[in-house]
Amino acid sequence: MIALLLRDLKLAFRAGGGFGLGLAFFLIVTVMVPFSVGPQSELLSRIAPGVLWLGALLACLLSLDRLLALDWEDGSLDLLATAPLPLESTVTIKALAHWITTGLPLVLAAPVLGVLLNLPVQGFLWLVISLLLGTPALSVIGTFGAALTVGLKRGGLLMSLLVMPLYVPTLIFGSEVARRGAEGMAVQTPLLLLAGISAASIALLPFASAAVLRVNLR
Amino acid sequence: MSIWEYANPKKFLATSEKVMPALWVSSAVLITVGLVWGFFFTPDDYRQGSTVKIIFLHVPSALMAINAWFMMLVASLVWVIRRHHVSALAARAAAPIGVVMTVIALITGAIWGQPMWGTWWAWDPRLTSFLVLFLFYLGYIALWEAIDNPDTAADLTSILCLVGSVFAVLSRYAVNFWNQGLHQGASLSLDEKENVHDAFSSPLYVCMAGFVLLFLVLVLYRTGTEIRARRIKALMARERLEA
């Protein structure tokens, strides 16, 4: 398992710039927002939590098609499927690698981008915490979407259509935590719900992803 | 005599052809009676005027929008567990009907909402969760269309339907939570059941029954079409092999 994780991480870091792309996309989206809604700092600080969450979500989504497609194309996915490691673990490791290379950098970059969007001071902590709790769910759900569409030639657009509705609860609770944090309100309820969604997704979705992958590898 | 006999496509077609005319007629009669009764023989609401009567389209279509997904969920489960092709095809056949019902519910709701709420659209929990349901339907249909191999498509879409159902329910509650976070209380949301007077409820039930039957007959019809399409494909493949 650890070998697989290290392999995926190495591939992400060394080959083809997949590592930085999600981060760069996050930055670009955040920079574009003031251009589209105007530079008034009150407005920006009000929408900052939601925009940052949406940007992180889109950055996650865009990096998903590399998650399994590359292994599918060169056949290493078949090897992994026949390896003694259960496919459920393989999928979980893939999601973990995706989270480390995409989710974690997003979490770390979010406060910096929060400065750009004039996020209120008390919001930074909760923004980071909500992203830290929410992005694993995004990675795991995304892995399911990637597994569904891995055999398709142009799966990217279809995958967005499939994954986005599944992201709705995570997005709602995640940005609610960030918004309430920024406005100085109590965050406990949405925070617990967000953590619950993450935990449940991590626990259950790998089974669905593995089942789907088995169908696709048939 | 068990329900699984209808997993045989031939048996399914024969029986569905026998019951379909009766279903067509009774659903048409029920919907016509319900709508005419509802539109012309019920009093105007004292606050909403005659706009209240759109309820006779809105509520039955919303009912079927949700239940179509539920039927797809059951059919998907049957496919995953017992691998009866007819049930996979029935799930596929139900999806576009569900989309149309969702759209009817959203549009009639907007038409009613314009004079009553003063807006075509509000991010009310009910409206929003219906929009999310619509997106789920779109993804499901798109996945069916994207995959060539019918068995692979049936497997993938049924798992998507199972996972999607869980997330659709989650979204429903998340959306509830989200909007209460924005507005205090649900000033726009209207628990229709509690407001409806007897004068409205009887034709409404007739309409709902009509829509249920309409959905049923449409699903049977479309499933039959899918079965025949599958047969034609098989025949053509066989011919190509022989030639």
Image (tube, rainbow, N blue to C red):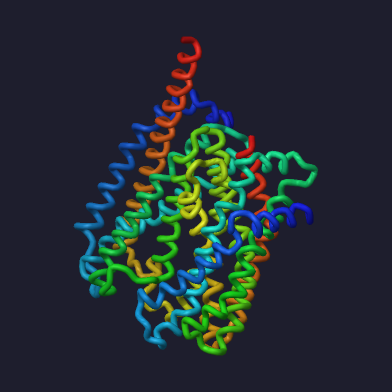
Q: Quadrant of residue B215?
A: top left
Q: Which residue is drawn at 30% across and 37% down?
A: B25
Taking the image as drawn, is residue A193 in sight? no
Report x, y in % for residue B205.
36, 55
Q: Nearest the camera: B217 or B163?
A: B163
Report x, y in % for residue B52.
26, 65
Q: Nearest the camera: A154 or A162?
A: A154
Image height check: is A109 above or below B17? below
Q: Nearest the camera: A53 or B93?
A: A53
Q: Which image quarter holds the C terminus of chain A?
A: top right
Report x, y in % for residue A192.
64, 75
Q: Which residue is drawn at 58% across and 38% down?
A: B79
Q: Residue at x 70, y 59 (%)?
A: A203
In the image, farthest residue toward the top: B243
Q: Residue at x 55, y 33 (%)?
A: B151
Report x, y in % for residue A155.
50, 46
Image height check: is B237 above or below A196? above
Asked if residue B130 lies left or right of residue B7, the reply is: left
Q: In which quarter of the image is residue B183?
A: bottom left
Mark count: 0
Taking the image as drawn, is residue B240 in sight? yes
Asked if residue A6 lies left or right of residue B137, the reply is: right
